Image (tube, helix red, strand yellow):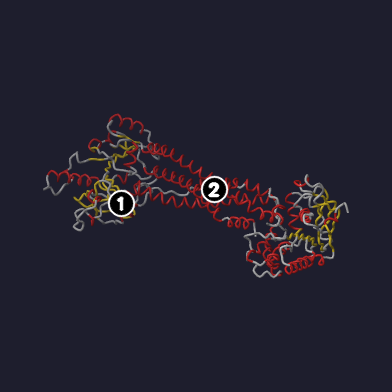
Amino acid sequence: MDRSVPLQVRDLKFRYPDVAAAAPGWTVDVSNLELAAGEQVLLTGASGGGKSTLLYLIAGLLDPAQGRVLVGGSDIHALRGRSRDRHRGRGIGMIFQTFNLLAGFSALENVMAALMFSEIPGAEHDKRARALLEQLEISRPDADPDQLSIGQQQRVAVARAIVCDPVLVLADEPTASLDPAMASAAMTLIQNICEKKGAALLCTSHDPAMSQRFDRKAAIESLGSGH
Amino acid sequence: MTDFTLIRRSLRSRLLSSVLTASLVALSTGLMLTLLSLRDASRRAFDRGSGNIHLILSADSSPLASVLNSVFYTGSPARSFKWAGYQDISKKYPLEFAIPVQQGDSYRGFPILSTLPEFFTQCKPDSAGGWQLAQGVFFKSEFELVLGAAAAKATALKVGDSLFLTHGQSDFNDVSETPESADSKWPTLKQALAQRHSYSKYKVVGILHPTGTSHDRAVFAELNSSWIIHAHEKRRMKDAAITVTRVTDLSEDDRLITALLLRCRTPPGSSESPVLPRVYDELRRNHPAITIAFPAQEVERLFSIVARVDSIFLALASVVLMSSVFSILIALYNSMEQRRRQISILRVLGCSQAHIFGLIVTEAAVIGLAGTLGGILLCVVANRIAAAAMFRQLGLIVSPTLLIEPALAVTISAVLLSGAAGLIPAWMAYRTSIVKNLRPLG
């Protein structure tokens, strides 16, 4: 995994098969997008503009019609099956609006679940996950996420995204379900931890307040080949 | 955090459904294993029970009834015949032994086998070994008896104790509850029907080691004594003044037996007798009124009848197993809707489609394995209950044990079938759309 080039997107085009007939044109059309090591970029755009879809394409969860996405120097779509999943697990951390924590698993287990698919030796999983949760001030790592406050759940989700030391963190509207004060605190946490870990951050948000936090901003509409 | 943690949590999140499906597997595999082990144990008990006896002569209605009554004590022989006509049978045929036995009496429900002292030296309960005493000696004289191991245990009788025999197969015999007891003004029906042979008490002189055969529940009594107590009652009916009956008072009509246990001569070191077919034919020709039974052949015939019933039960158990496998499929299939989000999260974390597929199939197999382990436990418990019931209801001593090979075969089959039941849900999980399922709820 080449940490110096976390993300390179070239001539990426995608449309959902079921909407292709109804709405001609691309759902995602990105001619060029690069993130340097540790760089933090806010991706803006209208609802339904393809921001989340772009993140899923970068994560290799969707296959583009054309173009390339290099994560840590490897073309994620050139990888197939298990190799792509392994590459995603090791190189990319994802944070979601609704946190998407595993129900029925403790906060600690949620973080350790990410380590299951990493190269980090099993013997270190517990120690590493606990240390990170402690660093993020999760006082009850063995509690189920639904017993934790919303803020703490968000921190568990952040811990899970970062625990494998990814080169890139993809945050899809991570503060959309939080009140302004919590949203600000959550974004500070995400940005700080990414900075600390040296991970690049590509974050989508509707919230205008978020734009001041990022030096670099990119509107999804402006990334296409038509611009 | 391992795959097993994921599977365990998944099973725990659907605890009731998991337990119910595993219970169904347990029920079917338990039933199968119990049937197989009982069949095997019964077979061993019957094979062993006839010991070294080649032929049985009796007045029973059929050879099977003869074997069941005379060797396995499943009932009392309905008819008896005179010993006098067969006393010199050993001289007429090439026999190693011809031991007369008389049945029909009991002690607290345990059958009495009245016979000669030679019974213990010549007849063997098991083709492998002879009788062994746990306590005391074999009977030698009149009114002495030896207890089978199970009979001794159940009655708590010891060497030196005395008892009266009861006519027929009555479980009533306690001396303190005799029909004549002053305390019981109105006897119970059981008491009223029980006819105690009050002429003389028998003395317990020996207790046998367990043989693992039906003989363990028998009480072995000296034959002359049996003739005496029955003759005395007949004589008293004619003349109430008679107080004593001795061997010398016995007539040929009193010397009745219910069976004659025969063994033909065999070459040294062999239990097979080349003269057996000839002896059988001659006996049939010379004694047409007598039933002649080959114990080994009758046991074989009995099992061929039982095997048909067994097959039906095994087929039923297989149907239950298949339905339990379907229930695993349905339970997992129904759970897939709720699990799509979890599967999508795992995929985002780096879990491959193949891994997800494997997790679901393994989960199904784990339900099958848990069920089979429950089935094995069920089989162990059911074996004990069935053995006790067979002893109590039929008087058969069987020692069913869990059969390793069938248990392994059933376990492997159940796990494979359960795993196969997980294939459709696993395919659904494999095909789960991550993007659709990660969208915010609502």
Which percent across, then down, holds residue A121? 70, 61
| Quadrant the N terminus of chain B occupies | bottom right
Q: Mark 2 is on which residue type?
A: Thr
Which percent across, then down, holds residue A86? 73, 54
The reply, left or right, for residue B41 in relation to residue B345 is left
Q: How many labels does the image show?
A: 2
Q: Mark 1 is on which residue type?
A: Leu
Give the crowd class for mark 2: few <14, some 14-19, many >=20 residues within 10 Å.
many
The residue singled out by tag 1 in the image is B147
Above or below residue A184? Residue B229 is: above
Q: In which quarter of the image is residue B238?
A: top left
The reply, left or right, for residue B133 in relation to residue B435 is left
Which percent across, then down, holds residue B360? 63, 51
Q: In which quarter of the image is residue A174?
A: bottom right
| Residue drawn at 73 percent across, 58 percent down | A119
User: Pointers 2 and 1 in contact (CB under 8 A)?
Assistant: no
Residue B116 in view here? no
Give the crowd class for mark 1: few <14, some 14-19, many >=20 residues within 10 Å.
many
The reply, left or right, for residue B130 in relation to residue A190 is left
Q: Counting residues from the N terminus, which is met first, the one under dot 2 or under dot 1?
A: 1
Q: Which chain carries label 2?
A: B
| Quadrant the C terminus of chain B occupies | bottom right
In the image, farthest residue toward the front: A22
